[in-house]
Amino acid sequence: SQTIHQWPATLVQPVGSPLSLECTVEGTSNPNLYWYRQAAGRGLQLLFYSVGIGQISSEVPQNLSASRPQDRQFILSSKKLLLSDSGFYLCAWMFGTTNYEQYFGPGTRLTVT
Amino acid sequence: EDKVVQSPLSLVVHEGDTVTLNCSYEVTNFRSLLWYKQEKKAPTFLFMLTSSGIEKKSGRLSSILDKKELFSILNITATQTGDSAVYLCAPNYGGSQGNLIFGKGTKLSVKP
């Protein structure tokens, strides 16, 4: 069965510090991978998606970036965090291009102070 | 602009009640609509709907899609306190990439 992992589970970072969140998927190959953010009082917002290694598409311009160095690894980064980057970051995966079910990892709660 | 509107935003019921949650959407290149349940953690998948008029059912939960009128409903019968959560509706847009646009959710509180 497929499993998706995210770490860390929680993170408190000062403004201006760098960020690296990691997501890995087990039990599948060549999944589509997604990064979402859920800010307080707002809905889930798609940030990035990837259909393969090295292929990243951005949905929302911001100071975040994403990379996919391996088939089942997806990384979200920032060089300098802003207060507005606080939120619940979720990684999700989808297998194939005809079954559109997406499954979420456990998430990372980021607080920028 | 793609958008999703869920109603009501919040709902308080008592155990045993039946509830209906609504989701209307406007998206380009619509492929499917997904429902999720979110407690104080990551959303968990409930249903994916692709065809109009075909009800999907799982226990006390059921859902149906109307592609002509661009809406979906999620029904929960005989509610239990464990049904308390935020229910999210997410149509898929943009073709094979599978991108989802989420509504703000309906917060359901079930009182004993």
Image (tube, helix red, strand yellow):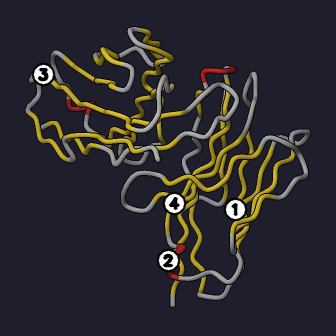
What is the number of the mark on residue B82? 2
Q: Are marks 1 and 2 in contact (CB under 8 Å)?
A: no
Give the left or right position of residue A14, taking residue A37 as reference: left
Location of the N terminus of chain B by quadrant is top right
The span from disc 4 to disc 3 (Cα, nearest Å) is: 32 Å
Residue type beneath disc 4: Val
The span from disc 3 to disc 1 (Cα, nearest Å) is: 40 Å
> Which residue corresponds to the image point at 44% horizontal and 9% vertical from the top-left?
A55
x%, y% of residue B22?
72, 56
- A49 or A85, which is in the foreground? A49
x%, y% of residue B61?
69, 68
Which chain letter matches label 3?
A
Assess disc 1: are there few (<14), some (14-19) or many (≥20) residues with their C-alpha within 10 Å of its C-alpha.
many
Residue beneath label 1, please?
A: B21
The span from disc 2 to disc 3 (Cα, nearest Å) is: 39 Å
Residue type beneath disc 3: Pro
Given this view, does label 1 or label 2 mark the residue nearer the observer? 2
The span from disc 1 to disc 2 (Cα, nearest Å) is: 16 Å
Residue B25 lies, with reference to residue B82, above or below; the image says above
Give the left or right position of residue B39, taking residue B77 as reference: left
The span from disc 4 to disc 2 (Cα, nearest Å) is: 12 Å
Which chain letter matches label 1?
B
Which chain letter matches label 4?
B
Assess disc 2: are there few (<14), some (14-19) or many (≥20) residues with their C-alpha within 10 Å of its C-alpha.
few
x%, y% of residue B42?
40, 51
Q: Tell me whether marks 3 and 1 sit on the same chain.
A: no
